[in-house]
Image (spheres, helix red, strand yellow):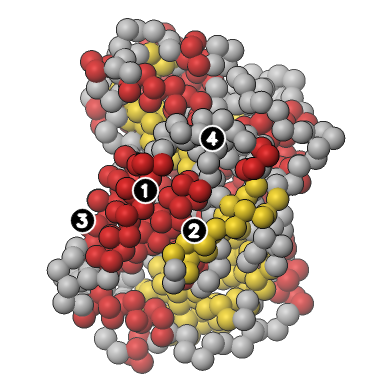
C-alpha cells in the first residue's frame, strides 16, 4: 500500500482519543459549548471498557447515611496511602456530586431508594455508602446515555480508528495519525487540542479484568515522543477476579454483604482487617487472599479462594447482582445462589499513567511544564487522584468528572489559539511501524511475545514483589523487546487487519511494562498497591514522592523530584489501618 493512496486529511479544533466516560464526557462539554470536536476510537464507542463497570460511581450525596465531601476526601487520601495529590482530590469530591446530577439530568436510570432518591451502596475503603448505582450495570448505562447525548450534540465520531502516532514537536501537540480499521489506510488529524482518554492497560498481565482493547497505546506513544509517565509501578489487583479467567465479579457483591472464605471455611479477613472485613480496600484484600493461597489455605490447595453470597438470598442476588451471578454461571457453571464462587486477584486498574495537572494538561517534567494543546484524562492519565491505590467507584467518577473538566478547559483553550503548524512529515512514523510489520521477514509472532510478557508480569510484578523476581523480569522484557523487532505478520491486507493492530498493541504493552518494572524496582518501600516483601514498610522520608519515567537510548530514566501535594494542617500522612 502506498502512503499517497491512503492519505486522508482532517482539520478539527479538538480531537479526543477514546470513547469511554472520560473521552465522551469531554467531547460532550466541548460540543455543548459550541466547539468542534471529533472522537477517535479503536472499538465501537459503547464497547469501551467503561461500559463494563458494574459497581457504581462515588459521590457524597448522603442519600442513605451521613456523609460529606470532607469524609469522601479523607477516605480517598487514606486509600491512596497518602500519595494522592490533595488539591486534585479536593476538586474531585466537590465535582463528583455535580457529575452524578449531570448524569441524572441526561436520563441515567439510577437505582432508587424507597422515597425516590438515588440509592447508594457500600464500597471498600469508603466510610459511608457512597456508590450511586444502576443494579450492577452502572458503567453500561452511564456510557450509553453519554454516547446518545454526544450524538445529539453533533460530536463527530471516527469509530474503529486506531491511533498509531502522535504529532508533537517543540512541546506543542499538532494532531495524530490513525489507521482506518475498516478500510485500511492512514489518516492525519490536525488539531489545536488533543485529549488522550485511552483508558486502562491491564492487558500487560495474564490474569486481568481488563478488556482486550486495554493495551495502553497512548502511554507508549507518549514515551516514544520523549515524554514521561508517572507512578507506573502502582497497579491495582482486584480481589475478586473469576478464577483462571480474571473476569471481574464486582465489589458490589461484598458491598451487599458477600463473604470471602478459605479452604477451612474461615472468613479470613478477620485476621487482616478486623474492622472493615470484606470491605477493606482492594490492596489489603488482594494481599490477604494471596497470603492464604501461598500458605496453602486456597481451596483444595489451589490458587483460589471463595466468594460466598449464598446467605444474601436468591431475591437480593437477582435484583442487585444479576451480572455477578450470570458471569459465575456462564464461565464456571457455578450457581452463586447455591454454591460459593472461585475467585483470585486480577490486575484491574492502573493508578499511574500520563502525567497531567489539575486542569488535565499533560506535563513533561517534575516542575510541571505543560505540553501545549495536549490533555489527558481517565484511566490513561495520572493526575494523581488515586495515588498508590484507588478506592472502588472513584474511577468511573474520576473518568467522568475529569473528562468533563478537561472539556471545559479545552473549550477555553481552542478559543485563544490558532492551529499549530503541521509537522514536516506527519505520516512518516506511523508508516514506518506498518512497513516494519508488513515487510519484516523475521520469524517472531506477536501473540507469543504477548503471552510470555503477560505470564511473567503476573508472576514477577504482581500482588507481592521482590528484587530477585523483578531483576529476572527486567531481563525477560529486554529480551522480548529485542525479539519484537523480528515480528512479522501474515495478513498483508488492509481491511480489518487484526494481525497488524495486535502487533502494534503488543509493542505498546512491552514499552510501558518496562517502565512498570523499573519503577517498582527503584521504589524500595511498600505503599498502597505496590508491596515489596523485601521492603514491607512505607517510607515517607524517602518515598513520599511521585515517580516520573522516561525511555531513553540507555534505558529507563527515573526522577523522584515531583512532590505530592499535601495539606499538612488537614491531612498529614498517618499510618493506614483498617
Ligand atoms: C470489569 C471492570 C469493572 C469496573 N467497575 C468499576 C466500577 O464499578 N466503578 C468504578 O469506579 N470503576 C470501575 N472500573 C474502572 C473504570 O471502569 C475505568 O477506570 C474507567 O471506566 C475508564 O474510563 P476511560 O474513559 O478512561 O477509558 P475506557 O472506557 O477504557 O475507554 C478507552 C477508550 O480508548 C480507546 N482507545 C484506546 N487505545 C486507542 C487507540 N490506539 N486508538 C483509538 N482509540 C483508542 C478505546 O477504543 C476506548 O474507546 C472497572 C473496570 C473494569 C475493567
**Label 2 with label 1: CB-CB less than 8 Å:** no
Instruction: Tell me if I can see residue 64 in this picture.
Output: yes
Q: Residues within 10 Å of mark 2 (few under 14, many from 20)?
A: many
Residue holding disc 4: 526
**Label 3 with label 2: CB-CB less than 8 Å:** no
- Between circles 3 and 2, the one closer to the viewer is 3
Whole-percent x and y of residue 371?
Answer: 65, 71
Residue holding disc 3: 448
- Between circles 2 and 1, the one closer to the viewer is 1
Ligand 1 neighbours mark 2 (CB distance < 8 Å): yes
Position of residue 150 in the picture relative to residue 443 (left or right): right
Residue holding disc 2: 198
Q: Pick the quarter of the image with the N terminus.
A: bottom left
Indicate which disc, 2 or 4, sits on the residue closer to the N terminus: 2
Q: Please tell me which residue lies in front, 5 or 280.
A: 280
Residue holding disc 1: 471
Residue 336 sits above or below residue 328 on the image: above
Amino acid at each position: 500500500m502506498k502512503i499517497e493512496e491512503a492519505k486522508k486529511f482532517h482539520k478539527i479544533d479538538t480531537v479526543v482519543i477514546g470513547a469511554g466516560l472520560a473521552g465522551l464526557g469531554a467531547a460532550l462539554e466541548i460540543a455543548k459549548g459550541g466547539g468542534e470536536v471529533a472522537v477517535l476510537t479503536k472499538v465501537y464507542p459503547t464497547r469501551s471498557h467503561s461500559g463494563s463497570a458494574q459497581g457504581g460511581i462515588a459521590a457524597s450525596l448522603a442519600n442513605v447515611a451521613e456523609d460529606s465531601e470532607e469524609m469522601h476526601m479523607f477516605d480517598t487520601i487514606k486509600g491512596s496511602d497518602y500519595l494522592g495529590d490533595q488539591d486534585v482530590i479536593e476538586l474531585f469530591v466537590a465535582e463528583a456530586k455535580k457529575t452524578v446530577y449531570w448524569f441524572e439530568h441526561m436520563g441515567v436510570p439510577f437505582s432508587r431508594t424507597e422515597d425516590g432518591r438515588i440509592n447508594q451502596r457500600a464500597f471498600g475503603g469508603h466510610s459511608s455508602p457512597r456508590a450511586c448505582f444502576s443494579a450492577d450495570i452502572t458503567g453500561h448505562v452511564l456510557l450509553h446515555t453519554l454516547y446518545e447525548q454526544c450524538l445529539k450534540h453533533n460530536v463527530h465520531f471516527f469509530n474503529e480508528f486506531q491511533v498509531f502516532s502522535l504529532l508533537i514537536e517543540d512541546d506543542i501537540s499538532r494532531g495524530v495519525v490513525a489507521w482506518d480499521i475498516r478500510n485500511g489506510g492512514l489518516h492525519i488529524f490536525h488539531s489545536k487540542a488533543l485529549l488522550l482518554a485511552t483508558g486502562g492497560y491491564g492487558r500487560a498481565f495474564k490474569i486481568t479484568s481488563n478488556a482486550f482493547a486495554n493495551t495502553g497505546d497512548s502511554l507508549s506513544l507518549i514515551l516514544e515522543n520523549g515524554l514521561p509517565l508517572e507512578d507506573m509501578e502502582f497497579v491495582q489487583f482486584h480481589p475478586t477476579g473469576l478464577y483462571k479467567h480474571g473476569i471481574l465479579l464486582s465489589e458490589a457483591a461484598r458491598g451487599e454483604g458477600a463473604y470471602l472464605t478459605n479452604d477451612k471455611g474461615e472468613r479470613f479477613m478477620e485476621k487482616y482487617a478486623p474492622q472493615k472485613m470484606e470491605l477493606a480496600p482492594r490492596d489489603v484484600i488482594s494481599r490477604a487472599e494471596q497470603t492464604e493461597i501461598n500458605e496453602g489455605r486456597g481451596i483444595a490447595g489451589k490458587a483460589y479462594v471463595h466468594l460466598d453470597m449464598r446467605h444474601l438470598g436468591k431475591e437480593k442476588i437477582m435484583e442487585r447482582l444479576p451480572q455477578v451471578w450470570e458471569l459465575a454461571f456462564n464461565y464456571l457453571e457455578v450457581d452463586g445462589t447455591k454454591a460459593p464462587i472461585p475467585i483470585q486477584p486480577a490486575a484491574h486498574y492502573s493508578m499511574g499513567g500520563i502525567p497531567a495537572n489539575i486542569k488535565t494538561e499533560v506535563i513533561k517534567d517534575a516542575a510541571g511544564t505543560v505540553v501545549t494543546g495536549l490533555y489527558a484524562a481517565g484511566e490513561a492519565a495520572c493526575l494523581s487522584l488515586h495515588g498508590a491505590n484507588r478506592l472502588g467507584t472513584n474511577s468511573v467518577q474520576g473518568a467522568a468528572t475529569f473528562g468533563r473538566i478537561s472539556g471545559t478547559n479545552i473549550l477555553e483553550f481552542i478559543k485563544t489559539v490558532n492551529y499549530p503548524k503541521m509537522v514536516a512529515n506527519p505520516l512518516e512514523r506511523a508508516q514506518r511501524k506498518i512497513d516494519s510489520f508488513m515487510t519484516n521477514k523475521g520469524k517472531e509472532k506477536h501473540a507469543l511475545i504477548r503471552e510470555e510478557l503477560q505470564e511473567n508480569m503476573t508472576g514477577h510484578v504482581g500482588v507481592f514483589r521482590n528484587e530477585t523476581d523483578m531483576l529476572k523480569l527486567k531481563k525477560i522484557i529486554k529480551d522480548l523487546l529485542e525479539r519484537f523487532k523480528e515480528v512479522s505478520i501474515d495478513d498483508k491486507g488492509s481491511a480489518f487487519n487484526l494481525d497488524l493492530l495486535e502487533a502494534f498493541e503488543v509493542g505498546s504493552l512491552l514499552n510501558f511494562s518496562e517502565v512498570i518494572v523499573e519503577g517498582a524496582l527503584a521504589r524500595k518501600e511498600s505503599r498502597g498497591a505496590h508491596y515489596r516483601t523485601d521492603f514491607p514498610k512505607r517510607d515517607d522520608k524517602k518515598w513520599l514522592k511521585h515517580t516520573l519515567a522516561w525511555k531513553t537510548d540507555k534505558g529507563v530514566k527515573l526522577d523522584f523530584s515531583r512532590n505530592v501535594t499535601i495539606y499538612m494542617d488537614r491531612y498529614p500522612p498517618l499510618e493506614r489501618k483498617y
